Amino acid sequence: MKRPVQSLFLISLLSLTALYAQEIKKTAIQTPWAEEVTAENVWKEYPRPQLERKDWLNLNGHWDYAILDKDAPRPGNYQGKILVPFCVESELSGVQKKVLPEQQVWYRTSFTLPSSWSGKHILLHFGAADWETRLWINGEYAGSHKGGSNPFSFDITPFLNGKEQEITLSVWDPTDTESQARGKQVLNPKGIWYTAVTGIWQTVWLEPVEKTYIADIYPVADIDREKVVIKNHIKNASEHTTLSVKVKSKGRVITEKSVNANSDLEIPVKNPELWSPDHPFLYQLEISLFEGKEKRDEVRSYFAMRKISREKDALGYERLFLNNAPLFQYGTLDQGWWPGGLLTPPSDEAMRYDMDMLKKMGFNMLRKHIKAEPARYYYYADKAGILVWQDMVTGFETARSKEQHIRPEAEKDWERPKSSADQFEKEWKAIIDHLRFFPSIVTWVPFNEGWGQYDTGRIVKWTQEYDPTRLVDGVSGWTDRGVGDMNDAHQYPGPGMEPAELNPGRAIVLGEFGGLGLPVKGHIWNPEMRNWGYRTYHSTEKLEQQYTELIHNMAPMINKGLAAAIYTQTTDVEGEVNGLMTYDRKVVKIKPEKLNKLHALLYRHPLRATEILPDSEVRPQTVGVSYRNPLRGNAAVKELFTEKQGPVTVKKGEEAWFLKTFELQEIPRNLQLRIYATGDIKVLLNGKPVVEKFLRTKRHYDEINLNHHISALQKGNNEIVVITGNVKNDMETDFGLYTYPDK
């Protein structure tokens, strides 16, 4: 009699565990598209536009769900309905509960196959589910998958029976309690870390195929030789299996060729129309698979003729080239988060809106930050003409961040355990395999700011060799290891950059800067949490003024080799209010037409900059220093300064005055200050105050445009004084001036 009592107790305990799963507070805001989501209209678009078949079945909609202990058996009863493909924690899922690492989510749904699919192999596709997924079909175990950001599928044909089929699924996610690739998800969101996402978060769907079918198509364009190579993966091909490809331009067939299955097909494209942000031209593909003379499969696809490379420009700087011409790339840090769906956009239209708005604002690029989007996202980037830098979805264990989150000054990478490294590399390869089709993606970014960074040289080299058609920004921010195509600085608010002279063979980019915040009342995710930006303002006018100043500060840097820049960020996200749009996308903080006009400054042809007063970043320079006030009014008394080699360390709590002198034969039309300092900074140019602001320089020199103060210069002798105060930590101080020609 004891055993039934124990079983009843266990069942009751599991039920209580599920019942008291922590509910997440309702969000205060929603996007316009979220307000229109229903089970009948949720994500009905074809999910794989790069390889499109006519027949398919969408399984999005209401499924049964249960949240149970991780070790609990498959549930007999479920706790309610969840709207797939939204994750359990999201409001749009209809559940909005927190899932702990000691728990897992169970799903159940059923479907009936169309009679026309009889005799076909049935593939069950998941766009993404976070993190470890196990699948049963009609009660039989069908397989598993690890990874939260890449699509996966199962051939479920052997498990089918009868008319109605049942899917049972379990998903377990350790979030930030382990070191798997989890992006910005944490169990306790704050600062730059967001709400956890567990379970299905992209479209689930079925498609019928023959035993022999087209599994993958990968076009590789070569604009220099005017051709495209169609790489293909055909499942279960024989020596009699052939692939026939039609290339269409503007609806007209321009070429048709065939090749044996799993062999590269080289197709000439004479006088190609090149893809670019200004002209995102796509060629169409119609692809048929034959076994002898019998057609076995047919898909539609597309490709673009475009080339991305790193080359020297006429000034001798390494630049990012598109189609053999230098192009300054300017975009936003694009997190891809949504108040109602978290990682999942509420609709295809909503997802497109962000990119359309960026184009209107005059950006030609975005950095997809620590997230891999659904395939349709990149398809639309291809169509709209947006260059994409694609991050790996990195991660580390929060409790062991001192070991796994590599600091900027760290001499060595994290010594990652082999099993963890193997899983990271498996997921990174899967993301590249999935996304390398899309021509809008021009740069891979394996690591960000030391998050789980390990064996950097090997990972970057592997990425470059695995996809030689794209550039690799090996480490975005912080811990550069001298590898990859770029040296990528992060500077908030900035702007700043590493000197091109110290980075031969690499392009100089500003991978993150800005982060100017504006909280908009009525459009805040959670008014009770800290809502912040790297600098926070409280009026649209002040935000616009400061953003304009940032762009004018950055534009001259292009003349010294800056090849790309990424502003933080597209939208507000949870507690971050530094977006150009609010989190609900209902307020655009600066008018797009104003931004478009402002950004035009960045796309002008660069001209050579000239040093007026060298700083000490590359070679030490002499500077006068005083630790007691050496000014009479605003004029420097030179005898009160002591000459030292820059940069000079100012200790915490000290006040210091720095003096440099220079001669001018002619008055320049443009003037730029480079400064490395922290605290309250005041700059005097021939006694005239030209800068008075708080700086928090880290690792890279800040740049400040002084064109409005050209009148302070004079022919002959000039002097510049920098005053530092309110210094919170020991900090090196240095500065210099340069000029550049008018456009």
Image (tube, grey):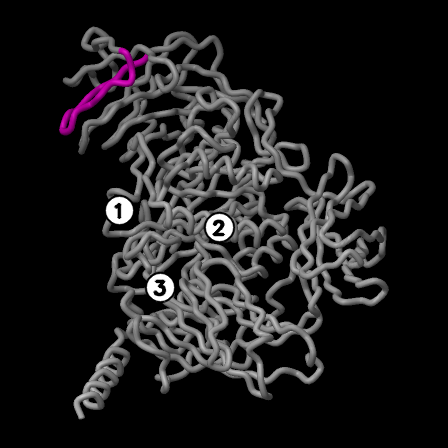
Left or right, 105 with reference to 609: left
Task: State how far apart marks 2 and 3 are (Cα).
Answer: 22 Å
Can you tell which of label 2 and label 3 is closer to the viewer? 3
Tell me the kind of residue under disc 1: Ser
Residue 414 drawn above or below residue 733: below
Mark 1 element type: helix
CB-based contact (under 8 Å), mark 1 and mark 3: no
Q: Position of residue 715 (x, y in %)?
A: 43, 10
Residue 193 drawn above or below residue 728: below
Tell me the kind of residue under disc 2: Lys
Q: Which residues are magenta?
A: 645-660
Residue 291 drawn above or below residue 249: below
Q: Image quadrant of residue 284? A: bottom right
Label 2: how many Cα within 10 Å (few below 14, some 14–19, many 20+): many
Can you tell which of label 1 and label 2 is closer to the viewer? 1
Q: Quadrant location of the N terminus?
A: bottom left
The residue pinned by badge 3 equals: 173
Label 1: how many Cα within 10 Å (few below 14, some 14–19, many 20+): some
Give me the residue at 70% from left, 70% from top.
210
The residue pinned by badge 1 equals: 401
Q: How many marks?
A: 3
Give me the residue at 69% from left, 78% from top.
119
Q: Position of residue 79 (x, y in %)?
A: 35, 84
Q: Magenta stretch: residue 657 in it?
A: yes
